[in-house]
Image (cartoon, rainbow, N blue to C red):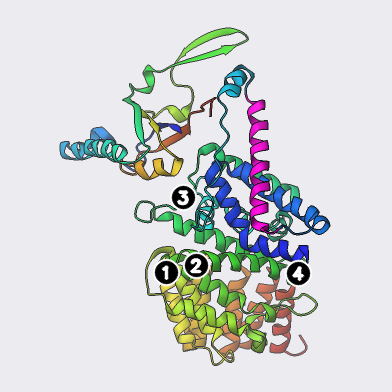
Amino acid sequence: MSAGDVLGRVHAESWGRLLGGLIRSSRRPDLAEDAVAEAFAHAARQWPAEGVPANPAGWLATVAQRRLLDAWRAEQRRAAPEFRAAVAARAHPPPLPPPGAEADERIPLLFMATHPALTEDVRPALALRFVLGVPTQRIARLFLVPLPTMAARLTRAKKRLADIGAAFGVPDPARWPERADDVARAVYLAFTAGYAPGDDEVERVAEAGDAVRLAVLAADLLPDHEVVQALAALLELHHARRAARARPDGSLVLLTDQDRSLWDAAAIARGLHRLTGLTPTDGYAEQLRLQALIAGFHATAATVSDTDWVGIARAYRRLEQLTGSPIVRLNRAVAVGEAYGAPAGLTLLRAAGERLPGHHRVALVRAELLARDGREAEAAEAFRAALSLMPDGAERRHVEGRLRALRPGV
Amino acid sequence: MKYLVLLIGDGELPPWNSLTEEEQAAGMKKFEDFDAACAARDGVEILSGEALAGPSSATTLRTRGGTLSVTEGPYAEVIEGLGGYYLIETPDLDTLIELLQVLPAYDMQLQPAVDPYE
């Protein structure tokens, strides 16, 4: 195994544990993360030339610890001059972590990175960085921001964690139940960022895969937290469709047109396995469970017409009761149209349309339901209304195709 | 770490003087419960805490251009509702947030004190 391979493996297995151990002992998430990153960079330079050390993870821990101590001492020297003498006399370096501490440090790391005292938009990025050690460059691409912007955002967040004295521990679910939801929300945000349109669909799918890894790890680390289990089920089931989602030229393929043989059967099986372990609950956990259930109905259907639309419509109804979201209402109208016929779907759609003015999907769903109901002229009008609201892109081309199919020659 | 906890606004709570005697007694009980919860938690200690006189009794000191000016009133609008404070020793912010949920649901501001020797 080459030095690079070993380093990659140690990174995957030990990044979170190394960082967690260092934060626990130093209580300085800002300095600790820099130190671990520097240790890995050092290894990438030294190992290929001088050989891989006998205990790679131990070597990295020692180097990271030394780096942290250097940074900490430098910071003490920069402290306010009037205290410098006193500081020099009383300085005590942070204690080293006890050897062989076996608890998985990635759990407190996950809670710290998604701490509610951080702004919501930085939590997903910090979770990917802290727990998995995803390179900042890759995180920047995921969130479609320039590298220096993302680097500055992460640095600010780490500094804030240190400044406010955020705990490195596992919050008591009875005393502070919102924290598990915060973890799930952050990971979900990372995932949806990967599915936002970007330049290169293939690249973006790989980046969304980081969020799926994080969700699965979180679910394995926190087996008793329903919200995290539901999230992992949802993301596995959704991400299982990734290979069918884009054409070789990078353009998107809608669910209806996807080649289902390209779906990842193993991922679907894992997602379904998690899903069947869940029972109806409430709050955010239930929202994610219902979404996973819907993804599960799609994942197990051999064709679009084989889909259990009645089941999907029922899940959407409960989801709408929980969220009151007009987007959910829109999706529910689609499912109801499939399950009970176009007129039933159109009735449901009316209320959604009022609450989503100017949203092209309202016109689009209306058009599809009208077409299904045989009202071609009205459907064409609705397709044109949708097109007038849509930007260029794969979805627009799909709608243009639908309009042409409806009225050949138009 | 030491944190200064400022009890600022009533938040969603009805104003104190609109409460019945029983409701006020229940509110007071929460402060006793908070004392007890802090005493029971490892590494947590209430170092100091006082109810404060109203913002109209506040004085603000400012030095501008080498000259000290003393003005009536609170420093800034955010402090207008300031009703009390605690100075609390706690291992970390999260422990403190957990404990503060024992108190009535005021708006609060939590600020760590800086120890130059840390």
Q: In the image, what residue type sits under mark 2?
A: Ala
- Residue A192's quadrant in the figure? bottom right
Please say if A284 is above or below A99.
below
Outermost residue toward the top in this view: B67
Q: Which residue is mark 4?
A: A1
Can you tell which mark lies on residue A219? 2
The residue shown at (49%, 86%) is A309
The percent position of residue A13, horizontal first and vertical second, equals 62, 63
Q: Nearer the viewer, residue A45 or A215?
A: A45
Please say if B90 is above or below A235.
above
Would residue A298 appear left or right of A52 to someone viewing this image?
left
Give the dominant element type of the magenta stretch: helix, strand or loop: helix
Outermost residue toward the right in this view: A49
SS of the residue under disc 4: loop
The residue shown at (62%, 45%) is A32
Question: The disc numbered 4 marks a residue on which chain?
Answer: A
Spatial separation of the CA atoms under disc 3 and disc 4: 36 Å
- Tally of marks: 4
Q: Which residue is mark 1?
A: A286
Which of pointers 3 and 4 lies earlier in the amino acid sequence? 4
Q: Nearer the viewer, residue A376 or A273?
A: A273
Q: Which residue is mark 3?
A: A169
Can you tell which mark lies on residue B1? none
Is disc 3 in the same subunit as disc 4?
yes
